[in-house]
Image (cartoon, rainbow, N blue to C red):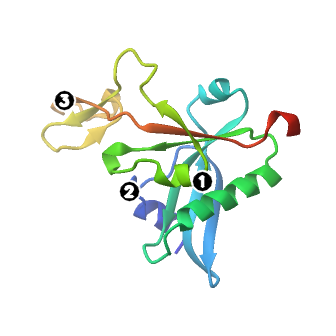
Amino acid sequence: MEVDDFIRAHYLGKRPAIVLLCLMMLANGEPVGCIIYSAPPREADKRYGGKTWELARLYLLDEIPRNAETWLIGQSIRYIQRTHRDVMHLLSYADPAAGHAGTIYKAANWRHDGMTDDERKSPRCDYVDARTGKKYGRKGNMPADAEVVRVPRVSKWRFHYPLHSRKNS
């Protein structure tokens, strides 16, 4: 399998907009998964006080043993600490709408850091074409003849991992 195969198999099914790092997990020389870090939301560097990357995709084949996700996260953190010293923080999200609670982040010692809509005055919405059921993140991306329905998004759990302690930076 190649990276694009893993991305298509991931529940989101698409590549993040700006990929900063992609690492493959191998077993007996064969690819069995990947982890992708991307550019985070623009306020992340300010929120955490330094350069921040987002763990945007993690996918392993079903036959890979339990706890492998946490192992892969740990390996990727050590790699980033060695090779990307300017990255100070990692960020990721767990989507309750997809049945995710952040268990792998908790197991990898990430800190729960609230929900995506904690600071918002109004919840974010997706736009759905009532005729087709297709979801769009922006109204401007919808076909001109779409029957627009606004659907509030489920707020995601936010997790943070500081890479370097202040005394070691």
Q: Amino acid at mark 1?
A: Ala
Residue nearest the observer in this picture, 111 or 75: 111
Could you tell me which secondary element the residue under label 1 belongs to?
Answer: loop
Q: Residues within 10 Å of mark 3 (few under 14, many from 20)?
A: some
Q: Residue furthest right?
A: 168
Q: Amino acid at mark 3?
A: Val
3 and 1 marks in contact (CB < 8 Å): no
Label of residue 108 in the image:
1
- Residue 18: image quadrant is top right
Q: Horizontal and vertical percent for residue 58? A: 52, 58
Residue nearest the observer in this picture, 53 or 74: 74
Residue nearest the observer in this picture, 52 or 5: 52
1 and 2 marks in contact (CB < 8 Å): no
Q: How many marks?
A: 3
The span from disc 3 to disc 2 (Cα, nearest Å) is: 23 Å
Residue under label 3, please give it.
149
Nearest to N terminus: mark 1 or mark 2: 2
Q: Residue furthest bottom?
A: 28
Q: Is residue 122 above or below residue 107?
A: above
Question: Which residue is at a point 45% across and 78% down the rendered structure image?
Answer: 63
Q: Residues within 10 Å of mark 1 (few under 14, many from 20)?
A: some
Q: Is residue 17 above or below residue 31?
A: above
